[in-house]
Amino acid sequence: GNAQNPGKLLGKLLRLDVRGATADQPYAIPPGNPFLGQPGRRPEIWAYGLRNPWRYAFDAGKLHIADVGQSQREEVNVLASNQAGLNFGWNIMEGSRCYQDASCNTAGLTPPVIDYDHSQGCSITGGYVYRGSAIPELQGRYFYSDYCAGWLKSFSYENAQASEPVSWPVANVGPILSFGVDGQQ
């Protein structure tokens, strides 16, 4: 239940100002944080309702978050990097479905832009948006994989939704732990 508890840091995306560190405090709280000054809410929190993010990737003013599910679904969330206070739904929702009940109240929750069930994999590995010049037709595509399944997928993000999903025909290379970018991206 920590992800829905604004008094706990677990299950959250935090926003800190490390340049504001002092001898007594390792960081300062940026003034735009949504819960700053609210009793019972940690001021470090930027967004909440995450279970186990396995890669945050900033790109062109957006933040992509791959969030590992509990037992049924894996998900990718995308938000504008200046969009504060969103609730991604864990543990009310797991991906696009209610977590423990057949129905649940989804009011105020931000659904994932893409999710999949455990018949397709068991643990999402988030990647990056391709911005390289070697393969121009891949420009703007977010790539991700699954630790158990070893496939490679991507999508474009336009008009606040995932579009043009592609499952790439690559051999299962085994557990994908991470992605990387080089100096040219």
Image (cartoon, helix red, strand yellow):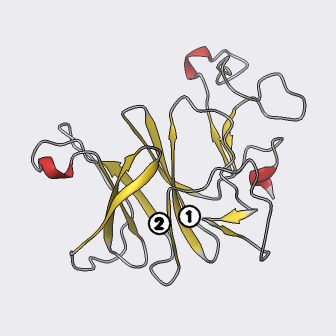
Question: Could you say which disc has been placed on residue 124 in the image?
Answer: 2
Left or right: where 44 falls relative to 184:
right
Q: Which class describes the residues within 10 Å of circle 2: few (<14), some (14-19), or many (20+)?
A: many
Kind of residue sitting beneath label 2: Ile
Q: Position of residue 101 (x, y in %)?
A: 80, 75
Give the residue pinned by disc 1: 68
Kind of residue sitting beneath label 1: Val
Proximity of marks 2 and 1: CB atoms separated by less than 8 Å: yes
Gap between marks 2 and 1, in whole Å?
Answer: 6 Å
Q: Position of residue 79 (x, y in %)?
A: 52, 41
Q: Position of residue 177 (x, y in %)?
A: 39, 64
* Foreground residue among 54 and 107: 107
Q: Residue at x 65, y 58 (%)?
A: 51
Q: Which class describes the residues within 10 Å of circle 1: few (<14), some (14-19), or many (20+)?
A: many
* Foreground residue among 30 and 27: 30
Secondary element at image label 1 = loop
Which quarter of the picture shows residue 151? bottom left
Q: Earlier in the sequence, mark 2 or mark 1?
A: 1
